[in-house]
Image (tube, rainbow, N blue to C red):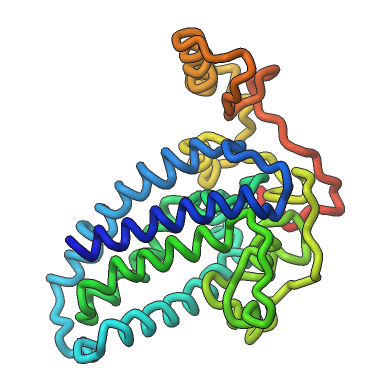
């Protein structure tokens, strides 16, 4: 329990540091804190999805596998120190993530489980939380199952989870930081934010999470020495993508146009539910006229509008 409290405290301190860093030295100036999709990423992906999938992964996948098979012959790391165990799993899992991430960008099927992560036009410390549920189930099962099955110290799980969260926030954070020669080994926003840019050159580049050395070793590094640009069309996907959590998951199974679905009354009611609730709250609490309220949908239309990118700027024809 003490370890959980410690890692949680460190994580919250890290969040405060990253938020302050983004305000003091932003990579993209003018990016709002409550940017487009902020509440979806915070409420649905960070809180609700993380809570539910934690139960699914540990209680319904890893736990049955652990108890239905005899793994005693594979527990070669039990005699290692906690530090050695953490380093072993951090390095091996990071290599796996690099390879699987690269495969996701090469496979039309796997891209459907990853495109949500690239859908944001305004990338910040919280953007890394936006990942398809199936992608999380695959990656975190492969991440934590070996830790438990191979007999690692119980402390390895929360320590590894803390490092994952800290690195995930750091590489997606809207901070202008240069690592110098360390960038050849450690990943940073300087490299990873390019991976979220809407350019053909980076669709198959900068796949690393913690250690950029993988990109250097396997020839997938892209480091032009300048920033992608600050316009919306410079970031995210080149095609229209739903902004709602459930619609994003539905879109990965079946492509659809939100505008066409508005003809159905049930969909129109659901689609406009959140903006209507915001209007009710504004009237109820009498918010100041100039208060900033972030609306997931445009106020002048029931359907979202995204930047139109020229045909020759499209990355891949995965939107089929």
Q: Which quadrant would the N terminus be assigned to in this image?
A: bottom left
Q: 12 or 166: nearer the eye?
A: 12
Left or right relative to 239: residue 224: right
Q: Residue at x 54, y 70 (%)?
A: 209
User: Which corner quadrant of the image does residue 317 belong to?
Assistant: bottom right
Vertical placement of 246 versus 90: above or below? above
Counting from the top left corner in percent of width and height, residue 105 is at 62, 64
Can residue 265 be seen here? The reply is no
Q: Residue at x 62, y 80 (%)?
A: 182
Counting from the top left corner in percent of width and height, residue 215 is at 63, 79
Can residue 243 be seen here? The reply is yes
Q: Residue at x 53, y 47 (%)?
A: 252
User: Which corner quadrant of the image does residue 262 belong to?
Assistant: top right
Vertical placement of 55 versus 206: above or below? above
Q: 230 or 182: nearer the eye?
A: 182
Left or right relative to 178: residue 137: left
């Amino acid at each position: 329990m003490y370890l959980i409290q410690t890692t949680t405290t460190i994580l919250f301190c890290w969040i405060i540091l990253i938020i302050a860093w983004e305000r003091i030295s932003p990579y993209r100036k003018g990016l709002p804190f409550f940017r487009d999709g902020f509440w979806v990423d915070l409420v649905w992906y960070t809180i609700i999805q993380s809570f539910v999938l934690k139960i699914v992964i540990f209680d319904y996948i890893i736990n049955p596998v652990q108890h239905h098979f005899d793994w005693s012959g594979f527990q070669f790391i039990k005699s290692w120190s906690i530090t050695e165990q953490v380093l072993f799993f951090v390095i091996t899992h990071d290599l796996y993530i690099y390879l699987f991430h690269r495969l996701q960008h090469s496979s039309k099927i796997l891209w459907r489980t990853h495109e949500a992560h690239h859908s944001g036009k305004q990338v910040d410390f919280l953007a890394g939380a936006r990942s398809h549920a199936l992608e999380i189930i695959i990656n975190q099962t492969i991440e934590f199952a070996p830790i438990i099955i191979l007999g690692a110290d119980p402390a390895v799980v929360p320590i590894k989870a803390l490092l994952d969260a800290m690195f995930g926030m750091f590489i997606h954070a809207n901070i202008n930081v240069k690592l110098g020669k360390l960038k050849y080994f450690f990943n940073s926003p300087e490299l990873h934010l390019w991976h979220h840019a809407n350019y053909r050159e980076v669709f198959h580049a900068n796949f690393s999470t913690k250690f950029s050395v993988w990109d250097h070793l396997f020839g997938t590094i892209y480091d032009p020495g300048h920033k992608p640009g600050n316009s919306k069309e410079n970031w995210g996907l080149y095609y229209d993508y739903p902004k709602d959590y459930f619609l994003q998951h539905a879109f990965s199974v079946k492509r659809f146009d939100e505008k066409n679905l508005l003809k159905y009354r049930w969909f129109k009611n659901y689609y406009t539910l959140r903006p209507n609730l915001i209007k009710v709250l504004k009237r109820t609490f009498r918010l100041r006229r100039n208060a900033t309220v972030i609306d997931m949908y445009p106020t002048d239309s029931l359907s979202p509008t995204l930047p139109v990118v020229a045909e020759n700027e499209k990355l891949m024809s995965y939107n089929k």
